[in-house]
Structures are given as C-alpha cells and as structure tokens.
Image: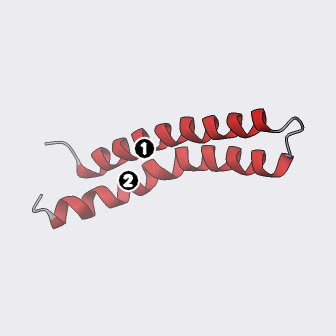
Amino acid sequence: MTDPALIGALVGLVIGVGDFFLLGYMRDMMARRRSSEPVGPSLALQVARFSQLILFPVVGWFVGPVIASNMGG
C-alpha cells in the first residue's frame, strides 16, 4: 500500500505547480497593464511562486497521514 505521506506530498506538488503557473500568469498580466512595472509586486509574486512550490509538498507530507488516519486508513 502507498504511504499517505507520499500521496499528500504528491497532491501538494500538483497544487504547487498549478499555483506556480497561475501566479506567473498573474505577474505577466500585471506587467502588460503597466508600461513601467513596479519591482515590489512583481518580486512578491515571484517569491510566492517559488515558496509555494516548495511549501505545498512539505505541508502535504504532514497533512496526508492526518487525513488518512481520520478516514480509517
């Protein structure tokens, strides 16, 4: 049987990759609307993109077993 921690990490990775592309799309749309892009919001979105790409799988690693144990797994 597959380890619930691994499943949680994989689900977190999928969500993190989706969010990575979504925040990248938002950053690009923000840059298109403004001729001179401010550094602050763009940098904040870039930091959020990469931090969530790392944090979601880590959180999923710990949350997966908790959810599995509450469901009788």
Quadrant housing residue 36: top right
* Mark 2 touches mark 1? (CB < 8 Å): yes
Q: Residue at x 19, y 42 (%)?
A: 2
- Residue 71 placement (x, y as % from top left): 13, 62
- SS for callout 1: helix
Q: Identify the residue shown where x is 26% and y is 64%.
A: 66
* Residue named by callout 2: 60
Residue position for label 1: 15
Residue 68: x and y in percent read 19, 58
Relative depth, front residue between 21 and 63: 21
In the visual, does 38 lie left or right of 22?
right
Please say if 28 is above or below 73.
Answer: above
Amino acid type, label 2:
Gly
* Quarter containing the C terminus: bottom left
Position of the N terminus, as image quadrant, is: top left
- Residue 37 position, x and y percent, is 85, 40
